[in-house]
Image: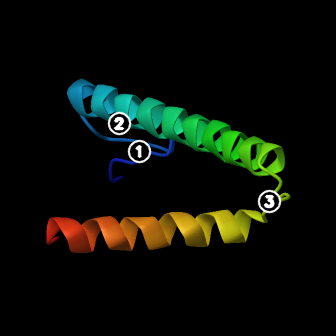
Amino acid sequence: MPFRADGGPTAGSPEARRQADALETIASELRYQNAVLTEVINTLDAIHGEGMRSLTAIHTAIEDHEVTRREQEGI
């Protein structure tokens, strides 16, 4: 059986299991941080009178900023 990072059956070494667990912990933390950031953005929108943007609008704005940043950095 192949090694799986999603908690499924594994045949990997203890080191590989620890690495997979660490990656899952990082992924969980990133999901939490993204949720917090989205809430902060929604709150700032409301405070500054822009109203509540949809999550799709927020995501699109973030992607636009990412594209601009990559272009400026030459990536």
The residue positioned 40% from the left and 30% from the top of the image is: 21
The disc label shown at residue 23, or none: none
Q: Are marks 2 and 1 in contact (CB under 8 Å)?
A: yes
Q: Residue furthest front?
A: 48
In front here: 28 or 69? 69
Location of residue 65 by image quarter: bottom left
Please rate how many residues cluster around mark 1, counting C-alpha atoms within 10 Å: few if below 14, some from 14 to 19, many from 20. some
Mark 3 / mark 2, whichever is N-terminal: 2
Location of residue 57 by image quarter: bottom right
Q: Find disc 2 in the rendering and name its residue.
A: 20
Please rate how many residues cluster around mark 3, counting C-alpha atoms within 10 Å: few if below 14, some from 14 to 19, many from 20. few
Q: Are marks 3 and 2 in contact (CB under 8 Å)?
A: no
In front here: 70 or 7? 70
Q: Are marks 3 and 1 in contact (CB under 8 Å)?
A: no
| C-alpha span from label 3 to label 2 | 41 Å
Q: Find disc 1 in the rendering and name its residue.
A: 5
In front here: 11 or 42? 42
Q: Residue furthest left?
A: 74
Three-letter code for the amino acid on which mark 1 is drawn: Ala
Three-letter code for the amino acid on which mark 2 is drawn: Ala
| C-alpha span from label 3 to label 1 | 41 Å
The residue positioned 78% from the left and 65% from the top of the image is: 54
Residue 67 drawn at (x, y percent): 36, 73
The disc label shown at residue 50, or none: 3
In front here: 40 or 12? 40
For numbered disc 1, what is the local secondary structure? Answer: loop
Mark 2 / mark 1, whichever is N-terminal: 1
Residue 33 drawn at (x, y percent): 56, 36
